Amino acid sequence: MAADTVHQIDHPALERPKVSEREPLHEGYLRIGEEVPPASSLDLKTLDLVDGEIWRQNKMWDRFDRLRKEDPVHYTPDSFVGPYWSVTTYEDIMAVDTDHKRFSSSWEHGGITLGEPLEDFELPMFIAMDEPRHSEQRKTVQPAVAPNMLKEYEPLIRSRTQGLLDTLPVNEPFDWVDTVSIELTTMMLATLFDFPFENRRQLTRWSDVVTNMHNPDICPGGEEQWRREMMECLTTFMQIFQERQAIPQKNDLMSLLAHGEKTRNMTPMELLGNVILLIVGGNDTTRNTMTASVWALNKYPEQFEKLKGDLSLIPNMVSETIRWQTPLAFMRRTALEDVQIRDKLIKKGEQVAMWYISGNRDEAFWDKPNDYIIDRADARRHLSFGFGIHRCVGNRLGELQLQILWQELMERFSHIEVLAEPSYTSGAFVHGYTWMPVILHPK
C-alpha cells in the first residue's frame, strides 16, 4: 500500500496522538511544532543538543554530523541541564566509557543523565556507582540474565510472542508500539521481577514517568506528580522486596536483590534506584528496538528482501537495528580530575555526555553509517550497550527477545507495512517511538 493511501482509510489507529502545548524548558528552545533550524545555521559555540523538540521531530542528525566534523569534543555553556561537554566520535566515546577511574558515573557526582538530580530525591543505582560498589551490586542481579536463565526463558518468550502475534489483526491498521513493542517487553519485565502479571503495565508507566518529569503528555502534574508516582513505585517494590526476603531465594531480580549479601540491606532509595534502572533498561531499550526494526525494514525494502531470502541473518539484523536506532542516546559521566581530550581540557566536576547515537553513525568508524545494512560485518561493535564496567547487564536477553520476535514474524507474515512516519519521544535520553501504525500482510 502506498503512503498516500493512508488517508483513505478511516481508522482510529491512524490518528496520530496529539502532543500537548508546553512552555520550552529553556530560553531559546523550540516550541511544539516550531521548525527546527538546520545545524549549518547555528552558532557552534552555543549549539545545544538537549532541546526535546529536536528529538521529537527526529532532527538531531545534522547536529551530530557537524560536531563530529568540526568540534568532536564540544562544550555547551548554557542549557536546560547546565553546562556540559559532548563527546561525539566513536573513538572518543570509547575512551571516556572505558576510563572509569577519571570519569565517574556515580550518583554522588550527578549520575548517568545530564543535569543535577533533585536534592532530596537522589536515586543510587549500580549503574550510577563507581567501583567497588558498582560490581558488588551488579554481580547480585547478573544471575537473572545469565546464559542458563536465557535458556530457561527462551521457550517462555517464544510462547508469549507466538500467543501475542496470533491475536493481532491482519489486513487492518493498528499501533505497533502499544500492541506489540510495549506488550512484549512488559510481559518479559514482569517475569524478570516476578511482578503480578495482571499489573504489568504499571511497569511501563513507571518507566515512562521516570524519564519524563517535564513532559506534560506523561506527567501533566510536573515534579509533584513525578515524586508521587516514584513513591508509589517504591512502596510497591519495598513490599515485594520484603516478601522475597521472607521466603527462600529464587532467580527473579527481586529475590536476588532481597537475598544478595551486598543488596539485602539497601536503603529504600537504593532499592528504588536499582528497580528503576532495571525497569528502564529492560523496557525502553527493547521496546524501541522492536519498533525500529519494523520501521528500518520499511525504509530499506531491499534489506527486507534480503532477510526473507536468509533468515539466518536475524541475529546480525538485531545488532544492526540496535546500532541504527541507539535506544539510549547518551550516558553521562563526570570528570573526577582535569582530563585532556583532543585539544580540549575537561575540568574536574564537569559533566560529559557520551553520545552513543552519534558514535553509532561516525563515518570515521562505520562504512555508510546512516544506512541500515542487516548483514553489516561489524554490527556487533555498536556502542548502544556501552563498554567497560558499565556494559548493559541484560544485553543478551534483549537480543534474544528481538531474535525470537523476528523468527516468529517471518513465519506468519509476508510484510509488516508501516503506514505513516512514527511519532518520536521528546527528549534526548531515551530515543524512542510513541506510535507507529502498521498493517500485517499474511503469508
Image (tube, helix red, strand yellow):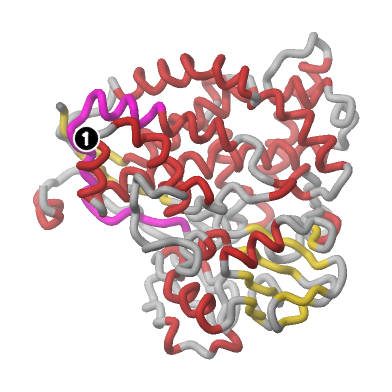
Q: Position of residue 302 (x, y in %)?
A: 21, 49
Q: Residue furthest front?
A: 377
Image side of residue 275 versus residue 21, left or right: right
Q: Nearer the viewer, residue 401 or 316?
A: 316
Residue 421 within the magenta-colored segment of the rendering: yes
Q: Position of residue 442 (x, y in %)?
A: 16, 28
Q: Position of residue 144 (x, y in %)?
A: 67, 24
Identify which residue is drawn at 34% across, 27% down.
Answer: 407
Q: Residue furthest top?
A: 248
Residue 262 vertical placement versus 222 (above, below): above
Identify which residue is drawn at 81% across, 67% down.
Answer: 335
Identify which residue is drawn at 71% across, 49% down.
Answer: 388
Give the residue pinned by disc 1: 309
Q: Quadrant of residue 166?
A: top left
Q: Nearer the viewer, residue 312 or 56?
A: 312
Residue 71 within the magenta-colored segment of the rendering: no
